Every structure is written in structure tokens, then in C-alpha cells.
């Protein structure tokens, strides 16, 4: 029996906490496959990538999400999502119908998985492979020091902006 104000307060606080926890748990998406913690590897295609997030759609198909600080989708963003969709299809056997780009203003843009996007993504993949296979060739370096510092070729690059 509740016969003191302290008991009533304790019960109210307990109920609020219970519903808060219930609300938080119900808000969690059970369809999240990865939150920047899964590296996709295809030995068959000899490709490796790590999307910022992967979710499952209502049909169980993996959908890549890339987070960008930009306020507008760039061609390189589209190609990157296309690359992740190629990887996901090879790994899961299911072609994602689309990927998502989450922009700096929290706008989400749907990138359809078209034949044209896959072709452009493969063109970029093959260009990178050509560079890796001929490291002596001069390659245009980035103008961004942070990207230059994190590049795997920084130590041997003749165009490196900043050395670690």
C-alpha cells in the first residue's frame, strides 16, 4: 500500500524510467547490420570497402549508407555508394536497389543502383587498380592535407603535401 509521498515518488520515477528504457529500445533499429564496424571483402572481385552504415531493407537486402559533411551530392559520392553496392551484391548474392547518402544537413539522398552507376563505379575501380599496378606513374595528388596524411602511399609519394 502506498501511504507516503516518498513511496509515490519512487513509483513514479520507476515508471518513468521503465517507459524511457522501453522507448529507447523500441527506437533502436533492428535492421542495422553495421555502424562503421564491418569491412566488406570480396576475394572473387579482389575488393575491400567499409561503408559508414549498412541496414537491411524490408526484403532483407543490405543497403549501404555513406555519411558526408558536404551539403550536395558529388559524383565521387555516387561512385563510392555504387562501389559498396557492387561489393554487397557479390557478398550477399542480392543486388541492392539503391544506396543512401546522408549529407551534412541530415538530408538523405537515394542513389539508385543503375547499370550506368555500376559502369562508372567499375571504371573508377579499374583506374585505381591501374595506379596500384604502376606506382611509378605520376598521379594527381589531393589538395587536402588530411587526405594526403591518411593515404597509404604517403611515404613514397613525390607529391605528398604533409609527411607524418
Image (cartoon, rainbow, N blue to C red):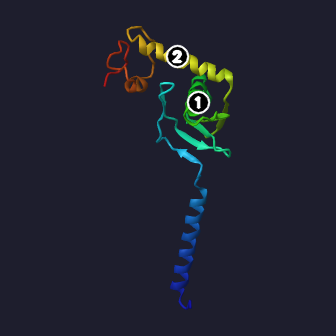
Disc number at residue 126? 2
Q: Which residue is mark 1?
A: 81
Task: First in sequence, mark 2 or 1: give its number.
Answer: 1
Instruction: Look at the numbered disc 2 and give the secondary structure of its residue.
Output: helix
Q: What residue is shown at x 35% (from left), y 12% (from top)?
A: 158
**Which part of the image, by quadrant, shows the N terminus?**
bottom right
Q: Among all residues in the image, which is located at the extreme top? A: 137
Q: What number of labels is visible?
A: 2
Disc number at residue 101? none
Image location of residue 99, percent across then percent down: 63, 34
Image location of residue 41, percent across then percent down: 48, 32
Q: What residue is shown at x 47% (from left), y 24% (from top)?
A: 46
Task: Depth check: give the residue in front, 53 or 149.
Answer: 53
Task: Depth check: give the residue in front, 80 or 91.
Answer: 91
Choose top left, top right, bottom left or bottom right for residue 131. Answer: top left
Q: Nearer the viewer, mark 2 or mark 1?
A: 2
**Is residue 104 shown to the viewer in this render?**
no
Question: Crowding at label 2, few (<14), some or many (≥20) Cα neighbours within 10 Å?
Answer: few
Instruction: Look at the numbered disc 1 and give the secondary structure of its residue.
Output: helix
Left or right, 57 with reference to 164: right
- Residue 79 position (above or below residue 31): above
Image location of residue 58, percent across then percent down: 68, 46
Task: Depth check: give the residue in front, 54 or 90.
Answer: 90
Left or right, 160 with reference to 112: left
**Which part of the image, by quadrant, shows the C terminus?**
top left
Amino acid at each position: 500500500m502506498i501511504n507516503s509521498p516518498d513511496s509515490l515518488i519512487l513509483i513514479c520515477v520507476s515508471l518513468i524510467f521503465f517507459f524511457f528504457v522501453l522507448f529507447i529500445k523500441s527506437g533502436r533499429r533492428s535492421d542495422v547490420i553495421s555502424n562503421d564496424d564491418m569491412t566488406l571483402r570480396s576475394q572473387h572481385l579482389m575488393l575491400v570497402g567499409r561503408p559508414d552504415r549498412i541496414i537491411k531493407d524490408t526484403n532483407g537486402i543490405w543497403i549501404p549508407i555513406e555519411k558526408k559533411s558536404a551539403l550536395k551530392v558529388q559524383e565521387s559520392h555516387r561512385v563510392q555508394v555504387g562501389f559498396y553496392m557492387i561489393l554487397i551484391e557479390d557478398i550477399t548474392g542480392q543486388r541492392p536497389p539503391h544506396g543512401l547518402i546522408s549529407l551534412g544537413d541530415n538530408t538523405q539522398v537515394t542513389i539508385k543502383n543503375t547499370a550506368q552507376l555500376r559502369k562508372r563505379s567499375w571504371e573508377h575501380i579499374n583506374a585505381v587498380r591501374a595506379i596500384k599496378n604502376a606506382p611509378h606513374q605520376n598521379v594527381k595528388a589531393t589538395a587536402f592535407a588530411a587526405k594526403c596524411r591518411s593515404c597509404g602511399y604517403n611515404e613514397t609519394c613525390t607529391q605528398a603535401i604533409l609527411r607524418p
